[in-house]
Image (cartoon, grey):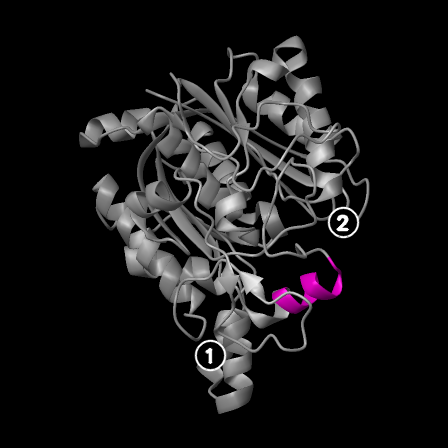
Amino acid sequence: MTGVVVTGYGVRTAFGDGADALRSGVFAGRAAFGPIERFGTGALRTGVAACAPGPGTPPLRTALTEVADAAVAMAGLPPGLGTAVLVGAAGDFTAVTGFWASGAEDLVQDSVAARFADVLADRLGARGPRLTFTTACVASANAIVHGCRLIAAGAAHSVVCAGGYLVEQENQSKFDSGRALSRDGVIRPFSEGRSGLLLGDGVAAVVLESREHATRRGADVLARVPGWGVAADAHHIARPHPQARGLVLAATAALGGGGPVDYVNAHGTGTQHNDSAETAGLHALFGADAPDVPVSSTKSTTGHMLEGAGAVEFVVTLLALLDQTVPPTAGFTGRDPACDLDYVPNEARAVPLRRALTVNAAFGGANTALVLELP
């Protein structure tokens, strides 16, 4: 197998663009939640999310393009290569509403998720494979996993993986009607009193390369991706397996017996079923060492970014390694008996970090795991 490395990234959340925005928000334990201004919420139980300031939802295609441009610029990746472009997204619901409002047929094209990979590949002058994943909350993580597979198989030497979600009315209404949203406007992952999730803006892109290709170009290697895994447990359409069977399978494949883990960026939605199941899965994964591994949910600050969660949290995990700092689980008010690990409550922690695991899960029992380590 060919070694996979990370040479660039771009990221945008409700805190703003780039790494410093994440440091000032996610790593500072400062939640971005507030009243939604970009659409009316009067008919909803919960009108709170982590949105970038200002009215209106920006086009997802524009946001994906901008973070991909930033990732490629950081990596110094030239156009015209056989670079693969992989995207995790569900299309742009705002494009659908724009079509009905204006009748402009070009808008509705953005509701077709496959279009995003084409748009990015054409813009970047990439001549490799292009594909969009629509696998809900693991979509952008699936894009990264598939990118690693292409490189490991020698089917691509460079891959741009992107994904995103921007808070819009359709999903806010669906999660609200399902009573999945936090009742008090705060996400409290793994904590007593947690009552649900909140949505958030999140778009990110990463450049993956084979180590040989990056070395040949003289690119700066930010981190290695030594392992990845996917698994499905098919336990329930919405609830995770109580023992997180799929997550454990995915993480076991990703870790591959390759040494200790210094930090886990958890899926951590702040729901009763997810957090207790994930805790059980981490106990199964790490055994007696589980209480000693710092675990945090950065959704406590960014919100749940749906299709964008995997890519954004991959970048957060990368920054944790680069900064030697574990981001906190914000909103933590006290221990739940079903959640008994070290969740780094409310304040970041400076610790030596070499190797980290980031996991994501989705409706239908889909699970992903990615390992990052310093080069």
Please provide the residue range marked out in magenta. Answer: 172-179
Residue 81 quadrant: top left
Query: Viewed as shown, does residue 155 lie left or right of 182?
Result: left
* Residue drawn at point x = 42 percent, y = 70 percent: 59
Nearer-the-camera pick, 117 or 74:
74
Inspect the image, locate mark 1, and give the three-letter code of the amino acid beneath it. Answer: Leu
Rendered position, 177 above or below 342: below
Q: Is residue 335 visible?
A: yes
- Tag 2's secondary structure? loop
Tell whether position 336 is magenta. no
Closer to the observer: label 1 or label 2? 2
- Tag 1's secondary structure? helix
Inspect the image, locate mark 2, and give the three-letter code of the amino acid beneath it. Answer: Ala
Rendered position, 113 above or below 337: below
Label 1 belongs to which residue? 107
Percent across and percent down for residue 252 are: 63, 21
Identify the residue at the far front of this view.
333
Nearer-the-camera pick, 42 or 235:
42
* Residue drawn at point x = 49 percent, y = 23 percent: 263
Residue 47 quadrant: bottom right
Percent across and percent down for residue 241 are: 78, 35
Residue 272, label in figure: none
Dot 2, crowdedness within 10 Å: few (<14), some or many (≥20)? Answer: few
* Distance from Cα at disc 1 to Cα at disc 2: 31 Å
Label 2 belongs to which residue? 238
Q: How many marks?
A: 2
* Residue drawn at point x = 70 percent, y = 42 percent: 193
Percent across and percent down for residue 111 are: 54, 70
Q: Quadrant of the N terminus?
A: top left
